[in-house]
Amino acid sequence: LFSLLLFVEEAQMNVDVRNFDLKGAELKVGTAAIGRASKEALSLNVPGLRENRPSVVKGDLVLVSPSSEGQRHKTYETYAHSIALN
């Protein structure tokens, strides 16, 4: 019974996190401090981040899919390297 409850809870968490999917979001090229170096990086504006909805912390996995028709089934994985609350 306990393992079933854990499974159901994880399934619900996956559904809940999909509520934060951003459609048509634009990645912007900029620079970020990674370690001691400043490197070119992509940034993404996430509405609600200041209110912790969604909660994103350094090291979280971020999945990005192009919206162009030819690349719809590609998904890129990256990690949050820094969080800036503007």
Image (cartoon, rainbow, N blue to C red):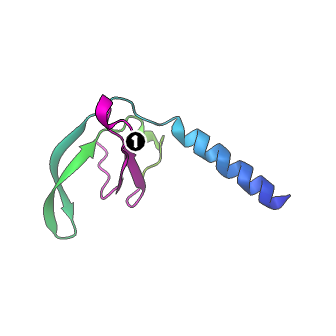
Residue sitting at x 60%, y 40%: 15
Give residue 22's position: percent from left, percent from top.
40, 34
Type of amino acid under label 1: Arg
Q: Is residue 38 above or below residue 10?
A: below
**From the viewer's perspective, is 48 left or right of 86?**
right
**Most distant residue in the front direction:** 70
**Most distant residue in the right direction:** 1
Q: Is residue 52 above or below residue 7?
A: above
Q: Quadrant of the N terminus?
A: bottom right
How many C-alpha atoms fall within 10 Å of the one at disc 1: few (<14), some, or many (≥20)?
A: few
Give residue 57's position: percent from left, percent from top.
41, 55
Residue sitting at x 31%, y 37%: 71
Quadrant in which residue 67 is drawn = top left
Residue sitting at x 66%, y 44%: 12
How many dots with numbers?
Answer: 1
Q: Quadrant of the C terminus?
A: top left
The residue wearing badge 1 is 50
**Most distant residue in the bottom direction:** 36
Residue segment shown in magenta? 57-86
Examine the residues drawn in magenta and state their main secondary structure.
Answer: loop
42 falls in the magenta region = no
Q: Which is more toward the observer, 74 or 27? A: 74
Residue sitting at x 48%, y 37%: 20
**From the viewer's perspective, is 67 left or right of 5?**
left
Q: Is residue 3 above or below residue 15?
A: below
Give residue 30's position: percent from left, percent from top.
15, 47
Q: Which is more toward the observer, 82 or 79? A: 79
Give the SS element for disc 1: helix
Q: Is residue 85 above or below residue 39?
A: above
64 falls in the magenta region = yes
